[in-house]
Amino acid sequence: MRIDNAYFTRRKFLNSILGGWLGAVAASFISPIVKFVWPPYKEPDEVKLVFADYSGMQPGEVKNFPWGSKPGLLKRAPDGSFIAWVGVCTHLDCNVSWVAAKQQFFCACHDGWYDENGTNVSGPPPKPLRRLEPSVEGEDLFVRKPGVGAKT
Amino acid sequence: MKIDMKKFAAWFDDRLALTPIFKYMTKKEVPQHEHSFWYYTGSSILLFLFIQIITGIMLALYYKPTLEGATDSIGRIMTEIPLGWLVRSVHSWSSTFLIAIVMIHLLAIWFTKSYRKPREATWMTGMMLLVVSMVFGFTGYLLPWDDLSLSATKVGTNIPMAIPVVGKWVTQFLRGGGDVTGDTLTRFYLFHVCILPLVIFAILAVHILLVQKEGMSVPLKDEIAKKKVPALPFWPNFILREVVIWLVLLGILLTISLMFAPSLELTADLMAPAPEGVKPEWYFLFLFQTLKIFPANMGPVTGEFVAVVLILIAVVAIFFLPFIDNKPEGKKGKIIQYLGVVGLIYAIVFSIWSLL
């Protein structure tokens, strides 16, 4: 049935109303499902380590520490201060290791190398290792993301 | 009481109306020509899919998809459960056989151009099945949860990151967070045993239905010459030949599974450096090597991005191949034929190169 001068029939109008309503109901479920499936993920702003575990490190020595669910790398500089990196390759996320004999960081997945300052020097890595900021505060060793100041 | 089987069958047929399907099967004919052999690859894939389902369900009886339990549960399957080592070996080898025959199936159709009208949709569903099979392999590779599978999964799930905007989203979806963790393992297991089986059955049903609807293709030159190609009845002649091939393949599968059972490494340590010699499954090797040869940066973008985009373009082009190759008997058709050869050589050379 079509009312005079109408653009569409009554059947088409009712179908659109019903279809649109069903679509809207279905769409209202999308957001909660998406939220559930993609879990919130946040890298730690800082991790707190026991300084005593790391105070015995020699200059040039590298030790691992847990940075959330990733490994972190902590290196003692010649002047006794610490340098820290996130220990995953900037190419495809594999965990890197310190090769003392070559004084370089190495990623075994695709043969990527970083020098002692974490700069990518050979292989596929496009960027240097990500730097973190370690700071010794009393008996604790904090490692923070750059720009995240100490919580007071 | 004597059951009258005829009456029994008639009762069922009254309700289910299956007679037309049986009639179709007995009337179906398979053309006989110089390329007929490739017809058998389709049913061989089904054989290995069947083996995967049976052995997969068996393994799932004891496997535990958790960070703490995964490796140990496979160790238990291999050492304590009677014939467990063999079931795991068959499942692992059968996946290799399946993918290998899927590739042969695809190449045979490429080179005989059987995807030409009216079988475009059959080709496209076939491509979807290939991708789903590879995702099956990729998700299954992580389940032993040892050092190698962890690193391979880190690399594999990081690749989408090369795509701007949506890439990060895809990676987080695959990993269930920013890193590969126990959540990734649970997720991969769910995909491997629940979601992908549902998907593969749905696509496979359409694929097989299309094959029945259009019948088997005949060689292009016979089609152009409108030549009457001799045919073999599907039942029982063709099935009998298929069964012979199945038995031979089963024998080879079992022999290889007995002699080369897969090993199990130590449980993956999320904090440990990647082990040397991280490699994906063999059918990803040429892609792995492709990623490796691209330089870190190419102008404003990373080499990885360029590689991923090129691979995606190739996949999309192959998916739509029947439409690109719309004049199979012409010059363009010939070029596409040669491109298939080039692609095959590329894949073989790069796979071997990645192992050196």
Image (spheres, rainbow, N blue to C red):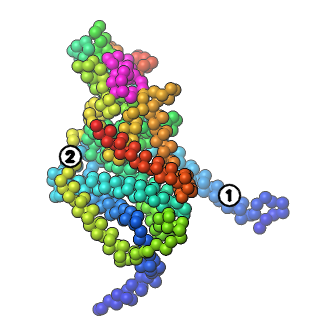
- Quick one: which residue is furthest to the bottom in this view? B1
Q: Nearer the viewer, residue A116 or A102?
A: A102
Other residues around mark 1 within 10 Å, as few (<14) / some (14–19) / many (≥20):
few
- Which residue in the structure is indicated by mark 2? B263
User: Is B28 situated above or below B91?
Assistant: below
Q: Is residue B206 visible?
A: no
From the top left corner, tell me how far across and down residue A31 is, in percent: 53, 45
The disc at residue A17 is 1
Amino acid at pointer 2 = Ser
From the top left corner, tell me how far across and down residue B140 is, in percent: 32, 49
Res A106 → quadrant? top left
For this view, does B318 lie left or right of residue A106?
right
> Contact (CB < 8 A) between labels 2 and 1?
no
Query: What is the magenta range?
Result: A112-133
- Quick one: which residue is furthest to the right in this view? A4
Q: What residue lies at 51% left-to-right and 47% top-to-bottom? A: B316
The disc at residue B264 is none
Q: What residue lies at 30% left-to-right and 23% top-to-bottom? A: A105
Q: For the residue labelled by badge 1, is the local secondary structure a helix, a strand or a loop?
A: helix
Queried whether the magenta region covers residue A121, the answer comes back as yes
Q: For the residue labelled by badge 2, is the local secondary structure a helix, a strand or a loop?
A: loop
User: Is B18 situated above or below B263?
Assistant: below
Queried whether the magenta region covers residue B301, the answer comes back as no
Query: In which quadrant is the C terminus of chain B drawn?
Result: top left
Res B194 → quadrant? bottom left
